[in-house]
Image: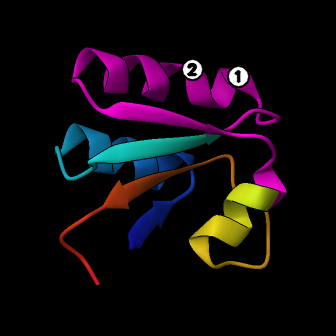
Amino acid sequence: MAFKIGTKQTAKAVEQREAAAIYVAEDADPQLTHKVVQISLQAGIDVIRVDTMKNLGIKCGIEVGAAMAAWIPDEE
């Protein structure tokens, strides 16, 4: 699984229609994530909730928390 990690990278992946799904941490600041979530839903991209930023970071294979990430299925 390949991820674009962070709010800006996730937004870019959604806008470019690269993302098959986005992951959003429940404890992330909604002011940062709301717009990207809305655009994703409108585009028919799945929005998957993760309980904490820390757990989302772990899922993405990084050692720090992440507010959101886009899953890019074609990348290794």
| CB under 8 Å between discs 1 and 2 | yes
Residue at the spot 52% in from the left edge and 37% down from the top edge: 48
As drawn, the label of residue 30 is 1
Q: Which residues are magenta?
A: 25-54
User: How far across and down, in percent of the image, does residue 39 sit?
Assistant: 34, 21
* Residue type, numbered disc 2: His
When asked about the image quadrant of residue 76, the answer is: bottom left
Question: Label 1: few (<14), some or many (≥20) within 10 Å?
Answer: few
Q: Secondary structure at mark 1?
A: helix
Check disc 1 and give the amino acid type. Answer: Pro
29 within the magenta span: yes
**Is 71 in the magenta?**
no
Q: Nearer the viewer, residue 5 or 2?
A: 2
Q: Residue at x 70, y 65 (%)?
A: 57
In the drawing, what numbered circle is on residue 34?
Answer: 2
Query: Which residue is the extreme one toward the bottom?
Result: 76
